[in-house]
Image (tube, coloured by chain):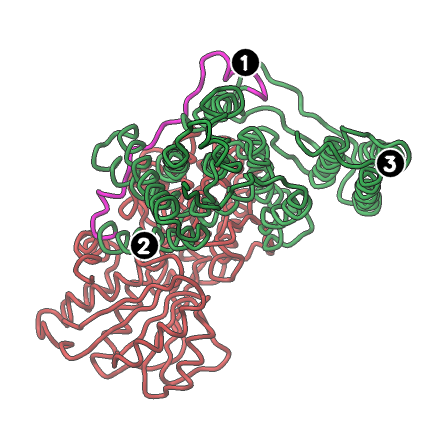
Chain colours: A green, B red
Amino acid sequence: MSQNTLAPAAQRRRERRFGLFSLLVLAVMLGVFASSTRGAQATFILNDARGQLFELPDLILPVVPTVIVLSALVAGIAARQFTRGFGSRAVVIVGVVALLFVIAFLTWAAAGGQLSVVGLLRGSLARATPIAFGAMAGVLCERAGVINIAIEGQFLAGAFTAAVVSSIAGNPWVGLFGGISAGVLVAFMLAGLSIKFQADQIVVGVVLIVFATGVTSFLNTQVLSGNPQLNSPTRFASIAVPVLSEIPLIGPVLFRQSLLVFGMIAAVIVLQYGLFQTRWGLRLRSVGEPPKAADTVGIHVLATRYKAVLLGGVLAGIGGSWWTLDAVGQFSREMTGGRGFIALAAMLVGRYSPVGAFGAALIFGFSDQLATSLQLLRVPVPSDLLLTAPYLVTIVVVAGLIGRLRVPAADGKPYVKQ
Amino acid sequence: MLAACGEAPDDDVVTDVEETDPVDDEVDDDEVDDEPAAGADFRGCLVTDQGGVDDASFNETAWAGLQQAEADLGVDIAVLESNSEADFAPNIQAFIDQDCDLIVTVGFLLGEATEEAAIANPDQDFAIVDYAFDDDYDNLLELVFATEQAGFLAGYVAASMTETGTIGTFGGINIPPVTVFMDGYLAGASYYNDEFGTDVEVQGWDGSDGLFTGNFESQDDGRNITDTLLQAGADIIMPVAGPVGLGTATAIEDFGEGKMIWVDTDGYESTQFGELMLTSVMKNMDVAVYDAMAAVVDGTFEGGLYVGTLENDGVGIAPFHDFEDEVPQEVKDAIPGLIDGIIAGEVSVDPADY
């Protein structure tokens, strides 16, 4: 949105760098995928194993011709990147190249086997859910000028509290309220220490993660393992939207999901509108840019920051609840497995906007899910290596995009009224 | 801490052991009735792997063996959970420093750390679950289990019960104590195919590589991998991944149909998802650990290799519970013959033979 003001020379250099990326992709496609001997055809199953309104035929692609067509498209794009360039659409085109590469890769991987497209997409969306919630929490905090790296801690606290409260109440809604409260509590500590006491926000974040990990692990061992009735939460059932969920392919992916997945999509839309189209959003963003200006026009900087961090706590608490109220009906030690940090990466890759963060979360969810789907296809890559895919993607995406990021000017800087 | 860990599951575990294992009952009678506190001065200590002591599976079963020893023999027991591989050696050392009479380490992943500790401390008795070393040590008892034998029976039953013609499995980490379950499962299904001329396919393991979550902790990974298997058409799934298997149960609940096969313990008793459990591949680690502790108390402890098999009741399959009426009678009738065949070596449990 704001990076299209590069000088023409820098613009050319960047296009050429993108061109090199395209050539690299092309080399892999032709060198590895097109010379595959894994099988002549790749079968993509478009139907949901549960059944739907009408059955779609399986999509059967001849491997080598498909890869060659995709390679030709990439070659064409590379040629233009080196000559005329794509101007303002340059970044989008890189995404297109990556997409063509993924399709070629899947065709190669599914050669001689079958890949369930529904399973792949549905799993991606489900796994993106907590990451998107966490990334939105980060967006709210950092737009208001408070660095929140404690998302992982908010996740853990939310997951633990949601599990216990839902177990006691026997109701996932009450459990969700518990998870939100825990997320807000951690956010309150973050806000208090970093806004009021002006402590170093990175250090506060690390401390809160360690604190949440320690407390939840301790209580898990001391209380939950001896009282399993406190750790058997009622979960949100998967909801099938009538009629829509019966549509082949998109039905089971988009309309047969759990409540939290629907909630996440709603939150993305509301937050994107709220942050960039409303007075509330403008004020929130203004305290994250040099806040003196906001103060001068009468915006209460500290109160606005407090509210943003606490609202972020609500979102992170919901994200944490996903583990125990949606994914699995049981809390276990450190079950969030570092996804809070991936959420942080998603926030950066998404350039501090809710929709961007959602897109980035989808990429991470997809690579996470792909690691599983590929194992089933017996791709000639050891399963141990495949499982590192999400982390590799994180590194590649973050390294490729972070460099050109515009951080809110007052991010991480406490404000003292003079 | 021990009381908190022990109380609730303790009752279940004790009944479980008594119901399922006749060998143990004999031991009980000898030890309990005559000398209730024979082991009062002894201390049994357990180091878990990363799954945690309440994993409803692997670590919990080994711990149940020590809890049983506490109840019957009056020994003092303690447990240390390992959060990461970096904790293995320090946890073992902590127990050496605490004068434990027997240190039980649970799991293949602790193999190296245990061997080093056993060499460095020749007067300290150790027992390790799931690791057979190249060398034998006088102070190190290796408890391994021929789970492929019981896995074979599970694969056979699953093949008879599938409605889609596809059954599935996945593991935690690609290591032998995990994949032997899957080997047997695959061989059992293949045997069923040969016998009945069916074409049941096993997804997730082909005898050399397959599906793995890459850990023994993330139930979310278990749910996800199960959803992938369900989408691929599998309707009976055997997760060999400790607590990760609980994710399989939630995936099946969400999907609306499907059954599962639990491992290590009888999942009907040890998890809250009994209604999904077709059967369980039981690896009676609790009995083996109990016997090792009892041997220490008796002064008869010896290092070396113990292999749990169908023959010595070290492994077995659990009752069908809710599916008792649905499993075909001919399959039920065939199982005793298969067990005899496996013990006699006439029925191969190696998938490479099919």
Q: Nearer the viewer, residue A254 or B257?
A: A254
Return the mark for residue B17: none
Q: Is residue B322 magenta?
A: no
Amino acid type of the residue tagged 2 in the rendering: Ser
Q: Residue B239: percent from the left, percent from the top?
A: 45, 47
Please report, as a chain letter, where disc 3 is located: A
**Residue A364 image offset from top left, x and y in percent:** 57, 40
- Residue denoted by label 1: A53
The region drawn magenta spans: A225-250
Name the residue that disc number 2 marks.
Answer: A217
Left or right of residue B186: residue A260: left
Q: Do tags 1 and 2 sit on the same chain?
A: yes
- Residue under label 3: A75
Label 1 vs 3, first from the N-terminus: 1
| Tag 3 near tag 2, CB within 8 Å | no
Circles 1 and 2, Cβ within 8 Å, touching? The answer is no
Place of residue A313 in the rendered image (x, y in percent of width and height, measured from the top left)? 38, 37
Camera-near label (1 vs 2) is: 2
Label 3 CA crowd tier, 10 Å (few <14, some 14–19, many 20+):
some
Give the amino acid at mark 3: Ala
Comparing A214 with A99, the one in front is A214
Q: How many angstroms separate mark 3 from mark 2 (CA)?
A: 52 Å
In the picture provided, is A358 more to the left or to the right than B99? right
